[in-house]
Image: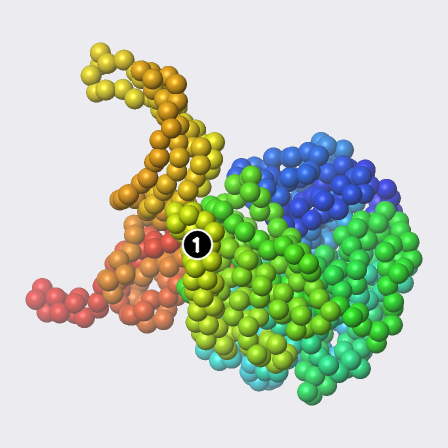
């Protein structure tokens, strides 16, 4: 053990070898920035998930996705490769004080961020709430200590009144948050919130819902008590507490009111001598001129991009510079005004492109990412780990964020016009995406006129989905009439937006050597060769068209052929499904079917149990979200799926088969 005399965190020193303990677009963002600073980079990769590591000096294979949060494994990797700093990105271990402390104590490695002392005061939601109260920052009424006991939360709810919010004390990114509007929902909601907490502890607070916007302040500190704000962001467009669209600055026109929120964030950051990047989050109602502190995210934020675009700074670079001992005045912040009322003249909006099926309750869309197009042009920035030369497969282990499209302009109308054009230029095959809903939102008058609170998207989800689908059909129709490509090429490109179900991505230069042997034992083996020279249409296995070269023993010189699949009895869903479990029949009312892919969290019933309509049969996790599968009718459980907790479950898997209780009652008198 190396040990440390540092109480607040490890020393700040030059970084030579940086381990990026993350994946996806944020890993790519950090690697690129470190390269510009001539820092040697090490990227963590798992089988089939390497596209984020392009540009890294070294690739380090880890055995499974779980290794990203396995502290002993990461400590050992740091030792083996002579790492002197780790950047955790966001999510995973980025808010773990234990990770920061152990990485220093056991390996002498600095974790980029505020250090374990500040993490312990801010990464825990309840501790952060106490910090706000010490600094006279308004907070919502809440339990004053964490709990896992239903009785304590019930007493709080009855005393303060519904609705209340349940929050995992150490959750993040919307995980472990449940809104409770009816007491009958409290027990189930609490179980889900507790499951979302690594420490299995939650707290409850009064919910502020209607008319409140999500406002967050970007803070940068150098550990000396000197802190700077970079104005605020607005993240009110969200569903299930997952942000979809963020913008900077906020759309609140009362800058004096916004200034009070920024001042509150600065006051809290100065109180603890904040170090590195941090986001202080609030709920704000401009009409009532009231705001409440929510939490601190003591790390780099997903939506840091919009702040970079309006302030013209590189936050990742500043973070790495501060970790190496720089003062605020030594960084790019020296050219940024500190006056709260002097708001940047630029506006920026970030659109999160996500692999999900919004038409099916926003469920994860798994599969192999096919051909795609992301927008370019003036005022358009795209942060992504997708690469045309790297295969990317969307599964259940990771976040489903595909790309962040960031649009910047001089005023709101100009930015919205760019957003609409950029989304017209965006399409992706192989998986379904939320492209329809993004197109609908930026076309809405409510969004244009800044009338959206945190519940706006869920209130209007139905109409937005309908209008988004209509907008996308119009874009597709326009491409049909204006496309310069041939009919076959047009058909290939018009699987917009993400409508193709292809699970198998075939590319130019893919080749096979096929051994063909007749059933007779005396027959000799023949080796045939096939190589794809051009893919015209790829919706394999349902449809495929390509130019190929084919050679066989009797004609060793390759010959050119056109290949076209005209029918198939296979399906992409069949390829992607594990095939291990019984499939449900949607026409059978006794079947309880899992409608999306994910990981089984728990089976809530057993064979022989009696269930009532709406009762939870099982819980399935998709990334951060744990979703309950409920029975549509009552009955007795006749059969239950034989699956283990943590096992991958395919879409359409039969969770349980019910039998009517009255049938049993009919039979009994005959016995």
Q: Residue at x 39, y 47 (%)?
A: 488
- Which residue is located at x 68 percent, y 73 percent? 412
Q: Residue furthest top?
A: 522
Q: Give the percent coordinates (x, y) of residue 25.
A: 63, 50
Image location (x, y in percent) of residue 463: 45, 75
* Above or below, 390 relative to 590: above
Q: In the rendered image, which quarter is residue 276 located in? A: bottom right
- Secondary element at tag 1: loop
Residue 498 appears in the figure = no
Residue 102: percent from left, percent from top: 74, 45
For this orientation, the residue located farthest to the left is 670
- For the residue pair 35 and 64, the one nearer the viewer reads as 35
Relative to residue 387, is residue 167 depicted above or below?
Answer: below
Q: How is the image coloured?
A: rainbow
Q: Which residue is mark 1?
A: 494
Q: Nearer the viewer, residue 582 or 608?
A: 582
Looking at the image, can residue 112 be seen?
yes
> What number of labels is visible?
1
- In this picture, residue 562 sits left or right of residue 265: left
Quadrant in the rendering for residue 273? bottom right
Query: Which sits in the foreground, 91 or 613?
Result: 91
Q: What residue is at 68 percent from the left and 38 percent from the top?
A: 55
Task: Tell me: 543 left or right of 182.
Answer: left
Q: Position of residue 253 (x, y in %)?
A: 73, 81
- Position of the N terminus, as image quadrant, is top right
Q: Residues within 10 Å of mark 1 (few under 14, many from 20)?
A: many
In this rendering, position of residue 410 left or right of residue 523? right
Q: Identify the image quadrant of residue 357.
A: bottom left
Q: Quadrant of the C terminus?
A: bottom left
Q: Measuring 62% from the left and 50% from the top, which residue is drawn there? A: 384
């Amino acid at each position: 053990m190396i040990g440390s005399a540092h109480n607040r965190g490890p020393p700040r020193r030059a970084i030579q070898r940086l381990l990026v303990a993350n994946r996806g677009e944020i890993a790519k963002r950090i690697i690129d920035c470190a390269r510009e600073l001539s820092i040697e980079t090490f990227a963590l990769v798992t089988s089939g998930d390497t596209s984020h590591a392009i540009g890294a000096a070294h690739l380090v294979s880890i055995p499974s996705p779980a290794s990203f949060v396995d502290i002993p494994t990461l400590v050992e990797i740091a030792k083996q490769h002579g790492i002197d700093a780790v950047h955790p990105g966001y999510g995973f271990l980025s808010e773990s004080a234990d990770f920061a402390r152990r990485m220093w104590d056991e390996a002498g490695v600095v974790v980029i961020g505020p250090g374990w002392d500040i993490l312990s005061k801010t990464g825990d939601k309840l501790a952060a709430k106490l910090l706000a109260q010490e600094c006279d920052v308004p907070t919502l009424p809440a339990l004053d200590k964490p709990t896992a006991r239903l009785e304590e939360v019930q007493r709080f709810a009855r005393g303060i009144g519904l609705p209340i919010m349940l929050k995992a004390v150490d959750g993040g990114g919307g995980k472990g948050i449940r809104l409770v509007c009816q007491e009958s929902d409290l027990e189930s909601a609490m179980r889900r919130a507790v499951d979302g907490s690594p420490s299995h502890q939650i707290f409850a607070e009064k919910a502020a819902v209607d008319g409140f916007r999500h406002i967050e302040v970007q803070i940068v500190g150098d550990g000396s008590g000197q802190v700077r704000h970079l104005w605020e962001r607005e993240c009110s467009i969200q569903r299930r507490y997952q942000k979809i669209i963020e913008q900077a600055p906020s759309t609140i026109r009362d800058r004096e009111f916004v200034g009070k929120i920024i001042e509150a964030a600065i006051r809290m950051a100065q109180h603890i001598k904040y170090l590195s990047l941090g986001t202080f989050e609030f709920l704000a109602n401009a009409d009532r001129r009231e705001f409440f502190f929510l939490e601190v995210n003591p790390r780099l934020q997903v939506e840091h991009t919009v702040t970079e675009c309006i302030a013209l700074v590189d936050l990742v670079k500043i973070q790495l510079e501060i970790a190496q001992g720089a003062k605020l005045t030594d960084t790019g912040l020296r050219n940024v005004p500190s006056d709260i009322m002097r708001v940047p003249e630029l506006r920026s909006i970030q659109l999160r492109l996500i692999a999900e099926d919004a038409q099916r309750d926003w469920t994860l869309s798994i599969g192999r990412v096919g051909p795609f197009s992301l927008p370019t042009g003036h005022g358009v920035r795209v942060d992504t780990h997708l690469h045309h030369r790297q295969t990317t497969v969307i599964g259940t282990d990771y976040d489903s964020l595909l790309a962040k499209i960031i649009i910047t302009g001089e005023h709101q109308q100009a930015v919205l016009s760019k957003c609409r054009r950029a989304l017209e230029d965006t399409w992706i095959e192989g998986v379904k995406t939320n492209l329809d809903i993004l197109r609908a939102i930026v076309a809405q008058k409510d969004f244009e006129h800044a009338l959206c609170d945190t519940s706006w998207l869920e209130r209007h989800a139905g109409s937005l989905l309908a209008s988004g689908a209509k907008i996308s059909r119009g874009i597709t129709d326009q491409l049909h009439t204006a496309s310069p490509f041939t009919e076959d090429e047009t058909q290939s490109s018009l699987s917009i937006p993400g409508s193709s179900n292809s699970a198998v991505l075939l590319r130019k230069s893919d080749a096979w050597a096929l051994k063909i042997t007749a059933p007779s034992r005396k027959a000799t083996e023949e080796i045939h060769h096939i190589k794809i020279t051009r893919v015209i249409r790829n919706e394999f296995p349902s449809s495929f068209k390509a130019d190929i070269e084919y050679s066989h023993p009797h004609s060793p010189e390759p010959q050119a052929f056109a290949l076209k699949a005209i029918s198939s009895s296979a399906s992409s869903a069949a390829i992607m499904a594990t095939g291990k479990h019984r499939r449900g029949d949607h026409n059978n009312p006794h079947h309880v079917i899992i409608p999306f892919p994910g990981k089984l969290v728990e089976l809530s019933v057993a064979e022989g149990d009696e269930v009532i309509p709406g009762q939870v049969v099982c819980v399935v996790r998709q990334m951060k979200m744990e979703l309950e599968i409920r029975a549509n009718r009552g009955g007795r459980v006749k059969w239950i799926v034989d699956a283990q907790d943590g096992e991958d479950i395919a879409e359409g898997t039969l969770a349980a088969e019910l039998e009517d209780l009255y049938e049993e009652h009919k039979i009994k008198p005959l016995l």
